[in-house]
Image (cartoon, rainbow, N blue to C red):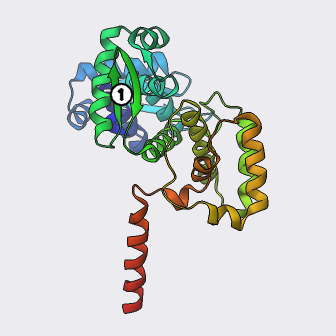
Amino acid sequence: MERLIQNMIIRRIRLLDILIHTNQWVPMKELTVRLSCSQQTVLSDCDYFENVWSDYVIIERSKKRGIRILMNKNHSIGELYKKMMKNSNDLTLLESFFFYPNKDTSFHAKRLYISESSLYRSYKRLQLVLMDRNITIAHAQDTYVLCGENELQIRLFFILYFCEVYEESEWPFAIDKDFICELVNSILKILPFRVTPLSLKFLMYSMAIAIVREDQGFMFSVGHDVGRNIDTNETIFQKIKEILLSKYPKINYKNFCQAILWWDFSWIEYKEKSVINNWSKKYMEQI
């Protein structure tokens, strides 16, 4: 995730991290060395925290002792990290590409209140990072589309992205959250793991992103049999199907099931799972 964030924001997050975890005065010279920047840059970053995040932190400065930070007890450091990341032009542009495919430069620039030249620079940085994840931002006739050879891999990337950037209390999708909760509650009995707030959040985002991408026209063929899982819990999945199609009749139901059964289908290639399972069995037999 760090590669998707601009250097200035990364530096400020590191400054915050140093001050929070040291929990005492930190000499200015130590900060400039650890952050590889000038004293003026550190002071400028302190001004940023005082002006933008005064509800979260209090910055204290001393010519002799250096700098220290006091955290507001009503807010967590994790909450501040997430809000700072969402202030990144690159990340807001990435989300704009995700939610509004096939829109042109002018649309995204006006929506995000940035210049077209800034947008293009962010686009180039995003393209470079996403290529390592086999995701491309197709740019043709001045429109932008997130695509790749493996649609499931794109969805998994964005599930992890939204989980990291957003708090549990936030909901970044236009889809009714209560609708997703209804779907989730329908399958709690068949989950093969202990449900935690994090796994619940992951599952809700899996469903929401599956609906968003399918509704935008991005589909993928089911390369393996989901019928076995559905048949085993026919009553539950029939209820899920009814709930889903009542609002989204055009959604491919079997594809959506992969969002529900992500623990079984979160492999880049499905053969990978079979190979690993076979080798695991052979290894266990030799012990």
The image position of residue 237, as x and y in percent, is 73, 56
Which residue in the structure is indicated by mark 1? 9
Residue appearing at x 38%, y 64% in the figure: 272
Q: Quadrant of residue 27?
A: top left
Q: In this figure, what is the number of numbered marks?
A: 1
Q: Quadrant of residue 30?
A: top left
Element at label 1: helix
Q: Is residue 61 visible?
A: yes
Left or right, 153 with reference to 179:
left
Residue appearing at x 40%, y 34% in the figure: 147
* Circle 1 crowding by C-alpha within 10 Å: few under 14, some 14–19, many from 20: some
Residue appearing at x 43%, y 83% in the figure: 281
The image position of residue 267, as x and y in percent, is 43, 58
**Type of residue at label 1?**
Ile
Left or right, 147 with reference to 251:
left
Q: Quadrant of residue 208?
A: top right
Q: Quadrant of the N terminus?
A: top left
- 241 vs 273: above or below: above
The image position of residue 224, as x and y in percent, is 51, 60
Q: Is residue 193 visible?
A: no
Q: Which of the pair 120/231 is nearer the observer?
A: 231
Left or right, 267 with reference to 207:
left
Q: Which of the pair 180/164 is nearer the observer?
A: 180
- 226 vs 170: above or below: below
The image position of residue 42, as x and y in percent, is 29, 24
Q: Quadrant of the C terminus?
A: bottom left
Q: Which of the pair 62/107 is nearer the observer?
A: 107
- 169 vs 240: above or below: above
- 215 vs 201: above or below: above
